[in-house]
């Protein structure tokens, strides 16, 4: 019988040599690792974009400050409910944009501090947080929610329709800046732990889960997130449009205890036009601060808005 000639394809299909068997085993292991990493990353991204929702309900009848409920409809995302706290009639409105895994209910002491200085103040829950169902896009669609809130408030007859200030923390900070770059009604901004593009927040989420050290895990999660938000594939980083903020006062806050977001915030500060300010604090995440740290933080926020967006208007009747 004639000896069958060696064929590379035949050897790959029916490995007989030790080095071919070793190569095939390595390839099979690599395929399994990639497949497992992709599956885990997909599940992890699902958990990240659908965080556990915290309660944000208050008893409006008994809460100080005479708050009222304001509903608005976000195209493609459903209805939202916000709390409006009135200040001087015709005064500017400060909108507080909560962070990831937070809600409007965790910002009520800051609301009171601003309302005490005669500002109109508004808080609401982004999708996937508090009273709002859905999933987060880490700022892409949240900026649309913020824009709709501004449109709704600007239509009222008791606020200044062209003077808004916005405070935001991580997710809320990205949404605030993304909206402000296209909306001249935003006259002052406080950006706490802001990032340049949503994928950076996905990376932070993966690392906080403890899986960031696994090979390809971060990149696989970012790819899964990008696939979920394919419609925004051509969206540039916020830093490319920072020039549009020239003349708008911005305070960048970075917390030492969150080094990755602090570094990203510092980079954004350096790229921002004047007027800009920078504050470095030892501990971030306002809802998690103790009472003394909250008071210091609130004073910083109120002082910034008083300097750059005075609460001028008339008393409410």
Image (spheres, rainbow, N blue to C red):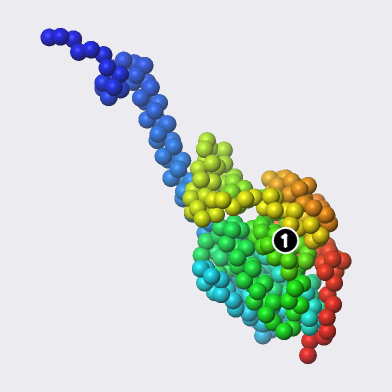
* In the image: residue 37, left or right of residue 167: left
SS under mark 1: helix
Name the residue located 78 percent from the left edge and 74 percent from the top edge. 92
Judge whether 67 appears above or below 26 on screen: below
Location of residue 199 with respect to 153 vertically, above or below: above
Residue 19 % position (x, y): 36, 16
- Give the camera-side residue of 312 and 234: 234
Q: Which residue lies under the disc numbered 1?
A: 286
* Residue ID at (55%, 54%): 232
| Residue 130: quadrant of the picture | bottom right
158 shown above or below 202: below
Q: Residue 63's spot in the image, x, y percent? A: 70, 81
Residue 251 drawn at (x, y percent): 79, 58
Is residue 283 in sight in this rendering?
Answer: no
Q: Position of residue 135 (x, y in %)?
A: 52, 61
Quarter of the picture holding the C terminus: bottom right
Q: Residue furthest right?
A: 307
Relative side of 298 to 6, left or right? right
Furthest-left residue in view? Answer: 1
Q: Nearer the viewer, residue 61 or 37?
A: 37
Could you tell me which quadrant the N terminus lies in?
Answer: top left
Q: Is residue 224 left or right of residue 110?
A: left
């Amino acid at each position: 019988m004639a000896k069958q000639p060696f064929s590379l394809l035949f050897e790959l299909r029916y490995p007989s040599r030790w080095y071919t068997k070793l190569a095939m085993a390595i390839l099979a292991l690599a395929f399994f690792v990639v497949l497992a990493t992709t599956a885990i990353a997909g599940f992890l991204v699902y958990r990240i974009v659908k965080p556990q929702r915290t309660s944000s309900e208050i008893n409006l009848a008994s809460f100080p400050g005479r708050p009222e409920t304001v509903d608005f409809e976000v195209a493609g995302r459903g209805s939202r409910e916000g709390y409006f706290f009135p200040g001087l009639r015709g005064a500017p409105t400060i909108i507080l944009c909560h962070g990831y895994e937070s809600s409007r209910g965790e910002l009520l002491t800051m609301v009171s501090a601003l309302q005490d200085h005669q500002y109109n103040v508004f808080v609401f829950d982004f999708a996937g947080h508090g009273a709002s169902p859905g999933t987060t896009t880490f700022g892409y669609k949240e900026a649309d929610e913020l824009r709709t809130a501004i449109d709704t408030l600007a239509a009222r007859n008791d606020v200044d329709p062209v003077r808004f200030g916005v405070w935001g923390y991580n997710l809320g900070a990205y949404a605030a800046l993304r909206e402000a770059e296209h909306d001249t009604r935003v006259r002052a901004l406080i950006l706490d732990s802001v990032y340049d593009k949503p994928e950076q927040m996905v990376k932070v989420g993966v690392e906080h889960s403890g899986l960031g050290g696994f090979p390809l895990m971060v990149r696989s999660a970012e790819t899964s997130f990008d696939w979920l938000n394919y419609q925004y594939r051509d969206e540039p980083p916020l830093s490319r449009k920072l020039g549009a903020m020239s003349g708008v006062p911005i305070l960048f806050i970075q917390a030492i205890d969150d080094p990755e977001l602090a570094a990203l915030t510092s980079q954004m500060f350096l790229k921002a036009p004047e007027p800009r300010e920078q504050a470095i604090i030892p501990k971030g995440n306002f809802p998690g601060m103790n009472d003394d740290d909250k008071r210091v933080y609130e004073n910083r926020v109120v002082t910034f808005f008083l300097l750059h967006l005075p609460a001028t208007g008339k008393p409410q009747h």
